[in-house]
């Protein structure tokens, strides 16, 4: 019985771990790739963008992995989400929107 409990607990922990997989931390390699879209991009902007995303987009769901975003996610879903968030009192400054988009689009590059 005890062994079974341990196994159940371990399985549950693994499941939780897999579900809360942290977002990728931007690296120099990401920075170089991102510069193809944003020539003046900095690592500080990517780090700031990640922070904004994690702090402001997690009220209703966890921060979704930008790797799987499509053109439509960027052109339609995210603007709609920013709108949704503002209705819940979570507002973005122009700079916050900009660095968050820079982070998401950069981390979306293969
Ligand atoms: C007021 C609640 C709320 C807030 C705040 C919110 N979302 Fe969402 N979001 C939803 C719901 C509901 C869905 C649809 C169900 C799901 O996929 O979890 C969704 C889905 C998504 C999807 C997936 C859509 C798809 O094409 O599969 C993305 C990407 C997304 N949100 C990004 C964001 C971003 C970026 C922010 C911050 C700007 C944000 N969300 C803030 C409620 C919210």
Image (spheres, grey):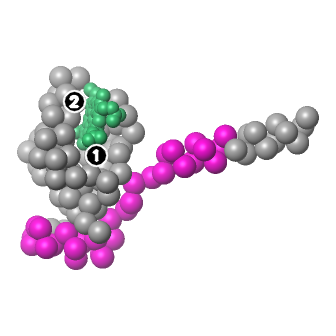
Numbered badge on residue 53: 1
- 95 relative to 3 in the view: left or right: left
Q: Is mark 1 within 8 Å of ligand 1?
A: yes
Q: Residue at x 12, y 52 (%)?
A: 98
Snapshot quadrant of residue 56 = top left
In front here: 46 or 10?
A: 10
* Magenta part of the chain: 12-40
Residue 51, relative to residue 83: is it above or below?
below
Which quadrant, please, contains the C terminus?
bottom left
28 drawn magenta: yes
In front here: 88 or 11?
A: 11
At which x and y percent is residue 29?
Answer: 30, 76
* Residue 54 appears in view: yes
Q: Residue at x 85, y 39 (%)?
A: 4
Q: Residue at x 34, y 29 (%)?
A: 60
Residue 56, relative to residue 30: is it above or below?
above
- 14 relative to 109 in the view: left or right: right
For label 2, the crowd category at 10 Å Cα-Cα, with few meaning under 14, some 14 to 19 and many 20 or more, is some
Provide the residue designation for mark 2.
85
Snapshot quadrant of residue 105 = bottom left
Q: Is mark 2 within 8 Å of ligand 1?
A: yes
- 45 relative to 10 in the view: left or right: left
At which x and y percent is residue 16?
Answer: 58, 42
Marks 1 and 2, Cα distance to the nearest angstrom?
12 Å
Which quadrant, please, contains the N terminus?
top right
């Amino acid at each position: 019985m005890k062994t079974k409990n341990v196994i159940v607990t371990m399985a549950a922990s693994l499941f939780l771990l897999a579900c809360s997989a942290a977002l990728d931390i931007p690296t120099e390699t990401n920075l170089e790739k991102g510069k193809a879209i944003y020539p003046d991009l900095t690592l500080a902007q990517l780090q700031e963008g990640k922070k904004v995303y994690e702090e402001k987009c997690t009220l209703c769901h966890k921060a979704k992995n930008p790797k799987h975003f499509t053109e439509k996610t960027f052109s339609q879903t995210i603007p709609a989400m920013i709108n949704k968030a503002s209705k819940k009192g979570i507002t973005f400054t122009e700079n916050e929107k900009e660095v968050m988009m820079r982070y998401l689009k950069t981390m979306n590059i293969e």
